[in-house]
Image (cartoon, rainbow, N blue to C red):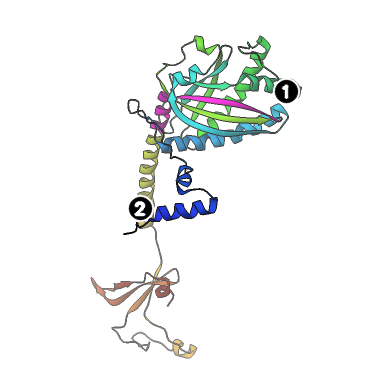
Amino acid sequence: MSEVLSQSQIDALLNSMRTGGSPDQAEEKKPEKKYRKYDFTTPRKFTKDRIKMLHGIFENYTRVISSRLNAQLRTNCEITVESIEEQKFYEFNNALMEGDVLAIVDVTIHPRTEGGQPTQAEDPVMIYLSTQTALGMMDRMMGSEGDTDREIPMGYAYTDLELQLYELLLKDIVALMGSSWENYVPVSFEYERTQVNPTLVTLLNLDETVVLVDMKLTFGGSEGRMSVVLPGNVLMSIFGEVNRESMGRKVASEDNSQQIFDELRDSSLEIIAQLGDTQLSLSDIYHLNVGDVVDLGRSKDSPVFLEIGGYQWFTGRIGTHKKNMAIKIDEVCYSAEQRSE
């Protein structure tokens, strides 16, 4: 009995005929699916939704500071978010070299709830600007063309003047960071100090979880890199305040809706009960007396229409209630067609 080929074998055979190779070679060319390793001993602190939220925040931040840098550097500066990744602090710290400089930033969270007190985070946020990029920006700030393609020796040490320019440059960038968080929670960022040779100072616990935001800078025909290190404890405090404000907004929304309905219940509306219509001459109206009957062409059991704002919203029956004339509602006209009849 002849062997029956499967659909995948038939596809491989047809593909090999088109490419001129054998089916085995066609199968070998298929790229192997790659899987990312996950360390179960150190689970992720932040969900994909939180990382996506940070991505949106820093996308907005890049648009804000790019316009600011355009004026400072006298050239078009484009900034894009390359990646946002959760990692351990030692992974970032080990990549630093002697001579690198970090901007240390204090973070203060301002709750929107009435009576809430601002909370200053214990751990600082760090901003890293590559040495070549920082020197190129400083050159442009001083009036040159900012040649960032020059060779920078390893372990280059900033001069005192360059450190002053670095601080002026980063202060402007840090001051604008809080505006990108306003949609979620008021957070202020304040430049604290410039840290030279950060590898010699313990800024955070090496095993501390941080979120590293890598950004790519393009200005004056050159490219550079800027990174923002967000400590896990700071983000947990911010996200906690975001959750509290979200719950507060939900409760406030429910309270407001109840208040709106209470106001509507106490409002006054003119309701007109239309028994029917007829045409009378002016002389007939003039000679009407108490006790006269006007023929409306409808029986006494015919429905009565109740109008609100010129539209028929209800139908009912005429009767009495506690010796007063009254109308008992039978039907509500929900559809627009019923109300316009």
* Above or below: residue 328 compared with residue 77: below
Q: Position of residue 328 (x, y in %)?
A: 28, 73
Looking at marks 1 and 2 on the same chain, the residue that comes earlier in the sequence is marked by: 1
Name the residue at the right extreme.
144
Picture quadrant where residue 174 is located: top right
168 with respect to 26 (left or right): right
Picture quadrant where residue 244 is located: top left
- The kind of residue on which mark 1 rests is Asp
On the image, numbered disc 1 is attached to which residue?
147
On the image, numbered disc 2 is attached to which residue?
262
Between 213 and 338, the one lying in front of the other is: 213
Which quadrant of the rendered structure holds the N terminus?
bottom left
- Is 324 magenta? The answer is no
**Secondary element at image label 2:** helix
- The kind of residue on which mark 2 rests is Asp
* Above or below: residue 310 compared with residue 93: below
Between 58 and 224, the one lying in front of the other is: 224
Q: Position of residue 93 (x, y in %)?
A: 49, 17
Magenta residues, as a range? 220-241
**Secondary element at image label 1:** loop
In 3D space, how far apart are the residues under numbered discs 1 and 2 (Cα atoms)?
68 Å
Picture quadrant where residue 136 is located: top right
Residue at 41% over, 87% down: 288
Which quadrant of the rendered structure holds the C terminus?
bottom left
58 with respect to 268 (left or right): right
Q: Position of residue 199 (x, y in %)?
A: 51, 12
* Above or below: residue 182 compared with residue 175: below
Name the residue at the left extreme.
322
Q: Position of residue 63 (x, y in %)?
A: 60, 36
- Is 235 magenta? The answer is yes
Between 122 and 228, the one lying in front of the other is: 228
Residue at 36% over, 46% down: 255
